[in-house]
Image (tube, coloured by chain):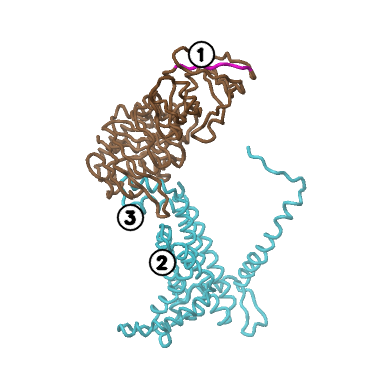
Amino acid sequence: MANVSLRNVRKTYPGGFEAIKGIDFEICDGQFCVLVGPSGCGKSTLLRMVAGLETITSGEIDIGGRVVNEIEPADRDIAMVFQNYALYPHMSVYNNMAYGLRNRGMPKPEIDTRVREAAQTLELTGMLDRKPRQLSGGQRQRVAMGRAIVRQPKVFLFDEPLSNLDAKLRVAMRVEIRKLQRRLKTTSIYVTHDQLEAMTLADILVVMNGGQVEQIGSPLDIYRRPATTFVASFIGAPPMNLIKLSGDEIRAQFAGDRRSAAEAGILGVRPEDLSISGAATADGGITLNLTVEAIERVGAETFVYGTRARAEKAVSATPGELPEGEVIVRIPGQDAPAIGASIRAAAHRDKLHLFSADGRNRIDI
Amino acid sequence: MEKSAVFKGKLLPYLLLVPQLVITLVFFYWPASQAVWQSFLREDAFGLNSEFIGLENYQALLAQPEYYKAMATTVVFSSLVAALSLSIALLFATQADKNLKAAPTFKVMMIWPYAVAPAVAGVLWLFIFHPSLGTMARPLRLMGFNWNPMLNGNHAMALVVMAAVWKQIAYNFLFFLAGLQAIPRSVLEAGAIDGAGPYRRFWTITFPLLSPTTFFLLVVNVVYVFFDTFGIIDAVTGGGPAGATTTMVYKVYADGRLGGDLGGSAAQSVILMVIVIALTAIQFRYVERKVQY
């Protein structure tokens, strides 16, 4: 049981590349913290710094009231689950789990109790004598989990533990991990690039980009009030529609608002907040005139891809996610307009997000 | 079921095998069968004719105390060379596997000795350790150590072992390094988090995971010390002093080429062949099973 604090943590590689550019946050005892971001954003590096597998260039990492910068991984009282599981291929499942306990000189009967308990929890009891190569992907994943929980560490670290599993198993294991963490009440840090995993697992979500923190908060807070256009387009699928507006347009749209200065900005609206049934709303919301370009039916809902009839272009914070001028509308059910049809999509004022022109700041409207 | 190309012709597969079969026949089966045949013959002193004498060559050989001495020498020599060259190569490989700046240079330097011919390697070591000319002999003597491989059998053995080890390290190093690099880094990181220090990590994770490589090298090294070290021994000591460095393969040469006893020499090579085949078979039968995971 422990708090984990990061204080102005930086990492610069010998070549001069700055992987982590000053990160501050605190995880309270028993919380499940998820670090999410695109590949190369430094989230795995940060996790490995907490584990002690990467050196810390400057700043402090504190686990349970103790600065661990100079402490060996073995003495930090953490356990880590690796992306490729990193099981010891020459040891049986039992020995894989017992290894860490033996290294710490725990008496044999206690090791046995702990390993069997963990095996029970993870439904591995019948497989204790097998070698990792005789196990399926999901079973290996559970052994990796078992190796972490037998140690009863202060902190669990997960480095994209589900990314080698197929989609169905990934969902099942995601739920398992969450249940297990709730029961054990062990502080956890979990790295993923999957925003769905991030939203469902996290007590606190840390969205990272380019070695920096973009936003920290509860998943729903971040979803409701993204701080930057990066967060807005990264959290939520499909991503938020972002439309560049000139200062005049903003003034026209949000008449009377004192913040609507003569500067340009970016308007954001989530696909699920647009509806194509209604006409323009009276409360100062927006209406977009779209030509339907493509339809994606996934069963319970349908995504309508349209281009805006007017000249304003939609912008995308994460290149490649949303082409310029394209707007996605998410509608329930399977009834969708025909391709080529002209539609009007409207959103209420309280569903709109406004960002500064560079996308770095959220503007309250 | 895996797809495989099927050729219609019955002749083609055999045709494709011919080059390999010819090489094996000409360079192994033919000389080997000649040796077996020769071992049943006795040639007269002038090499004019020979008579069939059955197992007499073998009986004479096994009644010879020198032959058992050569066997003992071989056991000492091969265990020393195999143990030293494997362990030193492993030590170097673990060092080269670290993220050191000089590692690439180090690796190249390590591999060079393998390109040196055995006899040249032997002469090189002889020059360094020659009792009267050697650059190392003088400092040794100044330290009060009476170094003389020309007269002292143990010194001679030490010298050929050094030369043989030095040459074989390069080869072993290469394979160990490749083996080390094939071990996933995350497995060792997991070990570090699991509380194993570098020493324990090496013996409980790295070493077991290297065992297929170690086993392969053990087989190769045993064959190396049994046969390929002939050049080194011939160049450095000529089997002396007083037969202290006469291994089995050197005795084959000494008795047959120098002593003119072709029958006895052939009998020795047959025994040597049987021993190496038996050793390899034992290694594969018992050791290999334990090194797979």
Q: Which residue carries the number 2 mark?
A: B84
Q: CA distance from mark 1 to mark 2?
A: 86 Å
In terms of depth relative to the viewer, which is nearer, A255 or B30?
A255
- Quadrant occupied by the N terminus of chain A: top left
Residue depicted at x 64% and y 76%: B51
Residue B148 circle label: none
Amino acid type for the residue under numbered disc 2: Leu
Q: Which residue carries the number 3 mark?
A: B199
Give the magenta part as a residue range: A341-348
**Dot 1 surroundings within 10 Å: few (below 14), some, or many (20 or more)?**
some
Callout 1: residue from which chain?
Answer: A
| Residue A192 locus on image (x, y percent) | 42, 35
Task: Confirm whether circles 3 and 1 share one chain.
Answer: no
Q: Is residue A128 visible?
A: no
Secondary structure of the residue carrying tag 1 is: loop
Q: CA distance from mark 3 to mark 1?
A: 72 Å
